[in-house]
């Protein structure tokens, strides 16, 4: 870990090369055997609940990524 909380310049896994979205979403959403399996179970108040599949989750992740790209968010290379 580099930096400090006081300065607000914390960094973990600097120079790391992990694609979290691929490991947690893409590889399951793009696999025929797992794409329709539940990725997230959401439970709200008063008995509300929803099961989100890996393929549905990938669609939502892509929507958020596109919003971030349109706002100018880019990868940071350290």
Image (tube, rainbow, N blue to C red):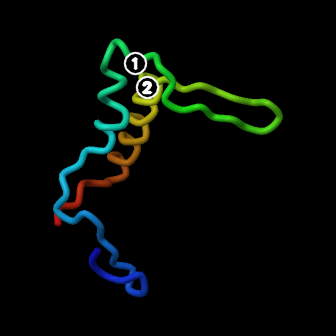
Q: Quadrant of residue 66?
A: top left
Residue occupied by mark 1: 35
Q: Residue at x 36, y 23 (%)?
A: 29
Q: Answer above or below: position of 58 versus 8.
A: above
Residue 54: quadrant of the picture: top left
Please provide percent x and percent y for residue 45: 79, 38
| In-front residue for pair 9/27 | 27
5 in relation to 66, above or below: below
The quadrant of the rendering that contains the N terminus is: bottom left
Q: Which labelled disc corresponds to residue 26?
A: none
Q: Residue at x 31, y 44 (%)?
A: 20
Q: Are marks 2 and 1 in contact (CB under 8 Å)?
A: yes
**Which quadrant of the rendered structure holds the C terminus?**
bottom left
Q: Is residue 13 above or below residue 72?
A: below
Q: Please tell me which residue lies in front, 27 or 74.
A: 27
Query: Number of callouts in the render?
Result: 2
Q: Residue furthest bottom?
A: 6
Mark 2 — residue?
Answer: 54
Q: Is residue 71 left or right of residue 44?
A: left
Q: Is residue 35 above or below residue 11?
A: above
In the image: residue 33, left or right of residue 51: left
- Disc 2 versus disc 1: distance between alpha carbons? 5 Å
Task: Please report the residue visible at 35 percent of the width from the left and 25 percent of the height from the top.
Answer: 28
Looking at the image, the residue that sits furthest to the top is: 32
Alpha-carbon neighbours of circle 2 within 10 Å: few (<14), some, or many (≥20)?
many
Q: Position of residue 9 (x, y in %)?
A: 33, 78
């Amino acid at each position: 870990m580099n930096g400090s909380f006081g300065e607000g310049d914390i960094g973990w896994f600097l120079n790391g090369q992990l694609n979290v979205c691929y490991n947690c979403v893409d590889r399951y959403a793009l696999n025929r055997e797992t794409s329709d399996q539940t990725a997230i179970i959401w439970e709200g108040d008063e008995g509300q609940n929803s099961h989100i599949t890996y393929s549905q989750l990938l669609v939502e992740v892509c929507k958020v990524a596109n919003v971030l790209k349109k706002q100018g968010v880019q990868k940071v290379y350290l």
